[in-house]
Amino acid sequence: MINRREFSLGAMAFFAPAQKERMTPTERVTAVLKGRMPDRPPFSFWHHFHDEAQPPEKHAAFTMDYQRRYHVDFVKVMSDYPYPKPAGAAWYELKPLDSPFPRQLRALELIRDGLAGQKYFVETQFNPWNVAEKLSSKEAVLRLMHDKPQSLLDALEAIAKSEANHVKAALEAGASGVFLSIANAQQTVMTVPEYRKFSEPFDRMVLAAAQDAPMNTLHLHGDRVFLDYFWKGWGAPIIQYSVAGTKFPMSEARRRFNGVLMGGLDENKSVTSTAADISALVQKARVAAPKWICAPGCSIPDDATDANQLKLSRVLHGQ
């Protein structure tokens, strides 16, 4: 455990002018994207602000304060503004929208201006299946898949086209890629053939809208993800998954994927772990270097304390 005096001294050193830094955050991440060894592993972590009722100025301010306080190397912008529900129609009777998340776009512009090119930032998008669940429920989407499959396919296509429009606008606003969260590609939700029919085409549509962006990321969410389906053929330079949840070691992922791997930390325990335990996880995940970004497998708990996040940041900064 870190006692109060040790933490205070470490925090003072952390926030003192970084005389030994050889790379900026952008340079550090760029090195990894190009397969070169950086001065230290770039890292980031994030959590939900639960600010979907707030204006974009507040969302941008929360994001900027967070990245500044914890000195992350790139910014994963949370995207919790809801997809618009159709007026006076069934939830699945949807038409493509030119701009489904206008408040989020305004926030991205403010984040871009605030970062001033000093860090990459990526825009989060939940895949069309997840958006459909939020418009209705998990049970309703599965029921529609079995009872009215074409209605579900039409709805997912409309969502995908809308999200693709948003992704293109996000890149124009300065984002360095899309962070596409896929939570239904796991055995507890659907089979591989069902994913191939009802989700893959639309996930690819969203990803294609950010084609060639340097930080496009597939976030494979869940403990029972069929990871082998994603190692090849998707074109995303970065894959993130939960090592702690899937029990699939980073060493094995490195053998199967030649792009950048993001992860290695336990998203649920890292913020409360000792400095020694955090460092041990980092050292274990280093097998994925140089194409490796140190991060939790998902967002950290929303109730993580400031002190614990500062500790995590300080430890990662010193690796």
Image (cartoon, helix red, strand yellow):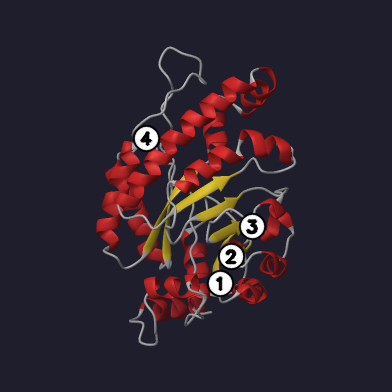
**Residue 97 appears in the picture as rendered:** yes
The residue to which callout 4 is attached is: 53
Determine whether the residue tagged by mark 3 lies in a helix, strand or loop: loop
Q: Residue 145, how many percent across, how many down?
A: 66, 24
Query: Mark 3 or 2, which is nearer the eye?
Result: 3
Q: Residue 27, how many percent across, how many down?
A: 39, 75
The residue to which callout 1 is attached is: 291
| Closer to the camera in the image, 110 or 66 | 110
Reply above or below: 21 against 192: below
The residue to which callout 2 is attached is: 261
The first of marks 1 and 3 along the sequence is: 3
Q: Amino acid at mark 3?
A: Lys
Q: Amino acid at mark 2?
A: Leu
- Total residue callouts: 4
Distance between the Cα atoms at labels 3 and 2?
13 Å
Distance between the Cα atoms at labels 2 and 1?
6 Å
| Closer to the camera in the image, 7 or 264 | 264
Tag 1–tag 4 contact (CB < 8 Å): no
Determine whether the residue tagged by mark 4 lies in a helix, strand or loop: loop
Q: What residue is drawn where x is 60% and y is 41%?
A: 200
Distance between the Cα atoms at labels 1 and 4?
37 Å
Image quadrant containing the N terminus: bottom right
Tag 2–tag 1 contact (CB < 8 Å): yes
Distance between the Cα atoms at labels 4 and 2?
33 Å
The first of marks 3 and 2 along the sequence is: 3
The first of marks 4 and 2 along the sequence is: 4
Q: Amino acid at mark 4?
A: Ala
